[in-house]
Image (cartoon, rainbow, N blue to C red):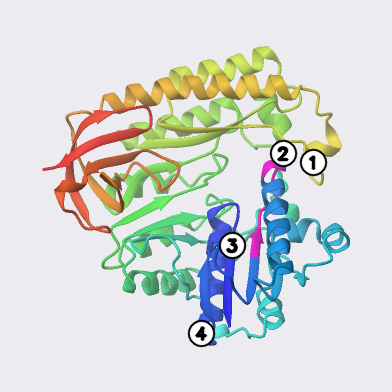
Amino acid sequence: MTVNILTLGCSKNLVDSEHLLYQFRATGYRVMHNEYDTPADVVIINTCGFILDAKEESIDTILAFLEEKKRGNLRKLFIMGCLSERYKDELLSELPGVDGFFGVWEMARILEAAGSRLDHQLLTDRVVTTPSHFAYLKISEGCSRTCAFCAIPGIRGSQRSLSIDNLLLESNNLVKRGVREMILIAQDLTNYGIDLYQKRALPDLLRELVKIEGLEWIRLHYAYPSGFPEEVIKLMASEEKICNYMDIPIQHINDCILSSMGRGHNRNKLELLLKKFRKCVPDVVLRTTVLVGFPGETDEAFEELLDFLARFRFDRLGVFPYSHEEDTPAFKQYEDQIPEKTKSVRAEAVMKLQQDISFQLNQDRVGKSFKVLIDKEEEDYYIGRTQYDSPEVDNEVLIPVDQNLSVGNYYRVKITGAEEFDLYGIVE
């Protein structure tokens, strides 16, 4: 039997798929991931249901594989993940050709429906679908925050942290298989451990992870500003393995908008935290996301955000136009009053500003040397990253293939050129 799992959405979904793939493989199945053109006995689509674009992608993928099922290219089609959790009743009535819909906590039921079974002794094992030298480590599920725009708590429930012992077991298994960079993810890294240890335990987890021999980089993704454990900043400054990189979504800077969003902090507290990062870790790279077009965002509030971004100069930045999602606090409290065109114009203005900032910051790296991890080889270039860049979302370092490098290894690279989102270099 062959199982093909298609993963849509975020890296947290990817980790779920990897655990499921391992369970299937352990019971004798041949497993594939994100194979769109290869027939399989069972196809499982791990969906995203967060915002409109993601929901549309999930539906389009389901419809495409229903057609493949009609053609006889698969026997069973199952749907799992956030879209299935959020809209199971609607999907059941509208997509009768699907053989089963499963939520985000139903691994055992998915395996059973496909003719396999869950082995509890293998819950810390995974099939790594990323390049074998890096992997995502999901340290908690769900979220206990109440951000007005976010549907995640309604989909995945309140935060459930994984124990440090289990995370260390999973991490050691990954490193034994060649993983050299671990990217810590959660809906909220900041509150990791509160439900298990009655304290924010991210510093405790990091102190254990840095002891793992063979693990060279530890990267932090998705930390809320409110309540951030500042001990992490000290660890970043002192522990070489912890990348000088922090993904900390601010969403906005205007106090009224932050309050309406339910973010739990104001502009002053946010700026104090960001400045502390840059003071204690002078070469830290800060990545953030902002949300434009939230109900009540006036022209003045948007200009305040734009002015702050121009002055603070985040190293990496993503922007999202507000999506008025049912089952969120904002959907119940506010009208979606800002036109879609205005949201798009504001998002484009933010990205144009960030493009200019990114170009200037990258130009400053020309002539300097950095430790670079090689991710892959493509035609004329090896593609690598510095500790200041996360895979798929940040800068890449392009090195001519005549350098004869090995994927998964680290090299000292001198930067010889730069564009807005790419660096060019040669091995020293």
Q: In this rendering, which labeled residue sits more in front, label 4 or label 3?
A: 3
**Distance of label 2 from label 4 (alpha carbons):** 40 Å
Residue picked out by circle 3: 6
Q: In this rendering, which labeled residue sits more in front, label 1 or label 4?
A: 4
Label 1 crowd (10 A; few <14 / some 14-19 / many >=20): some
Q: Which amino acid is tagged 1?
A: Pro
Label 4 crowd (10 A; few <14 / some 14-19 / many >=20): some
* Contact, mark 3 vs mark 1 (Cβ under 8 Å): no
Q: Residue furthest right?
A: 93
- Residue 199 visible in the current orientation: no
Which segment did they paint magenta?
45-53
Q: Residue furthest left?
A: 428
Residue 293 percent coordinates (x, y): 69, 25
* Contact, mark 1 vs mark 4 (Cβ under 8 Å): no
Residue ID at (70%, 19%): 342
Left or right: 424 as drawn, with respect to 140 = left
Residue 306 percent coordinates (x, y): 55, 18
Q: Is residue 46 magenta?
A: yes
Q: Which amino acid is tagged 2?
A: Phe
**Distance of label 1 from label 4 (alpha carbons):** 42 Å
Snapshot quadrant of residue 279: top left
Residue picked out by circle 2: 149
Above or below for 71 versus 304: below
Residue picked out by circle 1: 329
